[in-house]
Image (tube, grey):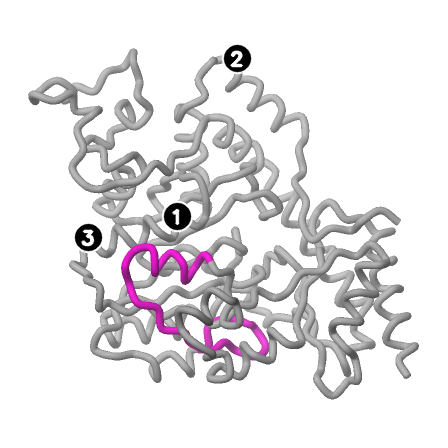
Amino acid sequence: MNKIGVGHASVTEIERKYVLDALENARLSQGKYVAKFEKKFASLHGQRYGVMCNSGTAALHLALETLKETEKWDEETEVLVPAVTFIATSNACLHAGLKVKFVDVDEKTYNLDPNEIEKHITKNTRCIIPVHAFGMPCDMERIMDIAVKYNLRIIEDCAEAHFAKTGGKVIGSFGDISAFSTYVAHTITTGVGGIICTNNREYMEILRSLVAHGRACTCEQCVASDGINVCPKRMQNDLDRRFMFVRMGYSCRAGELEGALGLAQLERKDEIMKKRHSNAEYLIKGLEKYECVLRLPRHPDNIEHTYMMFPIVIDKNSGINKKKFIEYLEQNNIETRPMLPLLNQPVYKKIFGNIEKDYPVAEYINQYGFYIGCHHGIGKTELDYVIDKIGTYIENLP
């Protein structure tokens, strides 16, 4: 059996067609494909504006910098972040000069636990970043109620949950700003990249400026450096408005190849999502006999999970040694990865100290959790193989 990876980048004729068209137009910097991708992706997530950038990490950082500017945040401002997430979420806060306050997660969803949030709110708390981990939507109704109660801003980290829904409403449409990653192996991929979505025009204008060095004009002509359709405001000042900078920005733009690839992927989203759902359901059905020792990614009926990956948490009383179990799976060509350990990272121990014990659910997940793939590149033969290997290991425990 070939290696069954945790992620998959599927490229078909439609991706090749759009990318080749971008190459033949000899426009590799931002142009029509980026603009189309931004509009379509934002619309699919219930938002008016999308700003494409070069990573999901940049998307989070730019979102924070935007709110920092509009809300007049300072170095004492605190942002609440779940204790289980990819390190980019909390790193973005630190890079923006803000303070991170961790909140423990729910033991079943692995997402920010609404019951824990208010314990960590202080006079300096200004924002919550709910992370829709592994494709499972957060309890946004309760989180939004808390945000309203304390007048807090919400940035949704949707890197792993494109198109997921809770209560019939798509994630990314609850908060002030939402940040997505389109890195390789994410549900929709542009190779490398990310996108920020919002309904707020002021935020959009600032985001477009920040992503391009702090540029003054964010109209389509200036953003695309269009040499044919020139911005009417371009030469109304002493400086060429395309090269006038009004804030300290960054170089975070994406190019036409990424935009073309992303637009093609969006046209295939239903096919991609259907396959991920069916694969995850097949794994759950095949492994449910082992739920006495393994926690599988089940979800309530009002949730539409996107299954970017298939998390598994071992029961600590099962007798299963996680290290030996993972080694066995890897030896049998089933790739595994840890479930986003954060508080035990060496760099965070230097910054925050040994705080993992203060977050018991996150600590448990770090000790007993891992994930495998259920992506749209996996077929029934591979799924049966995974189910068989996991079953064989459990049934032969001493």
Which residue appears at 52% of the width and 35% of the height? Answer: 262
Contact check, label 1 and label 2, Cβ < 8 Å: no
Q: Position of residue 336 (x, y in %)?
A: 72, 60
Q: Position of residue 215 (x, y in %)?
A: 22, 33
> Between 303 and 127, which is closer to the camera in this rendering?
127
Report helix, strand or loop for mark 3: helix
Magenta segment? 88-113
Question: Mark 3 to mark 2: distance in Å?
Answer: 40 Å
Residue to which mark 1 is pinned: 59
Q: Quadrant of the C terminus?
A: bottom right
Viewer can see residue 5: yes
Q: Which mark is residue 49?
A: none
Is-magenta flag for residue 336? no
Please report whichever mark, 1 or 3, sits nearer to the chain's N-terminal start.
1
Q: Position of residue 52 (x, y in %)?
A: 40, 38
Horizontal side of residue 78 vs 364, given as left or right? left
> Between 18 and 191, which is closer to the camera in this rendering?
191
Indicate which label's residue lies in the foreground, 3 or 2: 3
Horizontal side of residue 107 vs 198, given as left or right? right
Which residue appears at 24% of the width and 40% of the height? Answer: 205
User: Of all residues shown, which one is farthest toward the front?
Assistant: 350
Q: Amino acid at mark 2?
A: Glu
Residue to which mark 3 is pinned: 69
Q: How many marks?
A: 3
Location of residue 194 with respect to 33 vertically, above or below: below
Question: Mark 1 to mark 2: distance in Å?
Answer: 29 Å
Q: Amino acid at mark 3?
A: Glu
Residue to which mark 2 is pinned: 24
Question: Mark 1 to mark 3: distance in Å?
Answer: 16 Å
